[in-house]
Amino acid sequence: MPFDARDDKDRGHPRLKLVSGNSNRPLAEAIASYVKVPLTKGQVKRFADMEIFVEIQENVRGQDAFIIQSTSFPANDNLMELLILIDALKRSSALRITAVIPYYGYARQDRKPGPRTPISAKLVANLIERAGADRVLTLDLHAGQIQGFFDIPTDNLFAAPIFARDIQDQNEAKDVVVVSPDVGGVVRARALAKRIDAPIAICDKRRERAGESEVMNVIGDVEGKRCVLIDDIVDSGGTLCNAAEALLKYGATEVSAYITHGVLSGGAVSRIQNSKLKSLVITDSILPTEAVKAAKNIRVLSIAPLIGEAILRTSRAESVSSLFY
């Protein structure tokens, strides 16, 4: 019998509360549908000067509260919403507050790339902790070590099982090679390749400046193969488009891409549509724009069941890592 979090109160456990910010309301509603708990009534509004105001309109005292909020565009507004929601729940005496952040903004600033530069991913972690979060639940962090930026429990979920099922449905996993668009993504590519029993290849990328990249070489055998590029973030789309051209040049029969977070800023959607990519598959960790929905070679997979199940297991103090093994 499916677990219904609404039954927890009758069992003497804290009742599960789902609170949504404005960054991705459709995803929050899908998660609520999976968990079988309605979203907590509340409002997040702005004054004339764009100052954010939050009001929780239900009793949350002694409850297990989960805030669903991606810190995607506009990143600063959505981050501030998250912090104020945490503070509102803390001051309302919620027993435990979990920040569910499907897309963790500022994750690409996880180290000092040069002198006198910040590590903004650590700064954001500090802000979330100081606001009063007790745990963090996120998806496919740009760098796994960002978990160590928090001094509170942090679960990093993976979209790989969702991608693996879709690849098997689309390609029947025949003649597939999983490709990392750069050396840094080899661990992610290897994890997906293991799930679908496929070899891997690597694109050797040289980046001259931020936002621009050039594929110089392909390491591995891709001739006569269906190539599947795997990465955590697609922003401008330049890396993917260059990688697709290089793979086809090296003999690949077709190239698809599976990317967890579809940032797709600027002219990225148009660039993807006019590229050599057969398809780009992203998740709804970031609310898809109308341009993304209209693009013929971009598909969106829902992560609501994955996050919903992780929320249920967290609330019941069960294993979350077992979702991936």
Image (cartoon, helix red, strand yellow):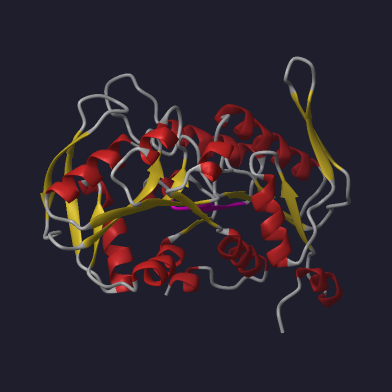
Instruction: State the image quarter where residue 160 is shown.
Output: bottom left
Q: Is residue 66 visible in this depiction of the protein?
A: no
Tally the numbered discs.
0
The magenta segment is 135-140
Residue 138: say if magenta: yes
Residue 325 located left or right of residue 50:
left
Residue 162: say if magenta: no
Is 81 drawn above or below residue 135 in the view shown?
Answer: above
Residue in the image at 31% along x and 64% along y:
191
Is 120 drawn above or below residue 286 in the view shown?
Answer: above
Q: Nearer the viewer, residue 317 or 266?
A: 266
Q: Is residue 80 visible in this depiction of the protein?
A: yes
Residue 179 located left or right of residue 301:
left
Q: Nearer the viewer, residue 297 or 26?
A: 297
Residue farthest toward the top in the current orientation of the protein? 49
Instruction: State the image quarter where residue 267 is shown.
Output: top left
Q: Provide residue 55's location: percent of width, then percent of height.
A: 83, 37
Residue 69 located left or right of residue 105:
right
Q: Nearer the viewer, residue 219 or 320?
A: 219
Instruction: State the image quarter where residue 96 is shown.
Output: bottom right
Q: Provide residue 77's location: percent of width, then percent of height.
A: 63, 28
Q: Provide residue 127's location: percent of width, then percent of height.
A: 57, 34
Q: Provide residue 198's location: percent of width, then percent of height.
A: 24, 70
Residue in the image at 84% along x and 70% along y:
9
Q: Main secondary structure of the magenta part?
A: strand
Residue 265 located left or right of residue 242:
right
Is 73 drawn above or below residue 21 in the view shown?
Answer: above
Q: Quadrant of the N terminus?
A: bottom right
Q: Nearer the viewer, residue 18 or 241?
A: 241
Q: Quadrant of the C terminus?
A: bottom left
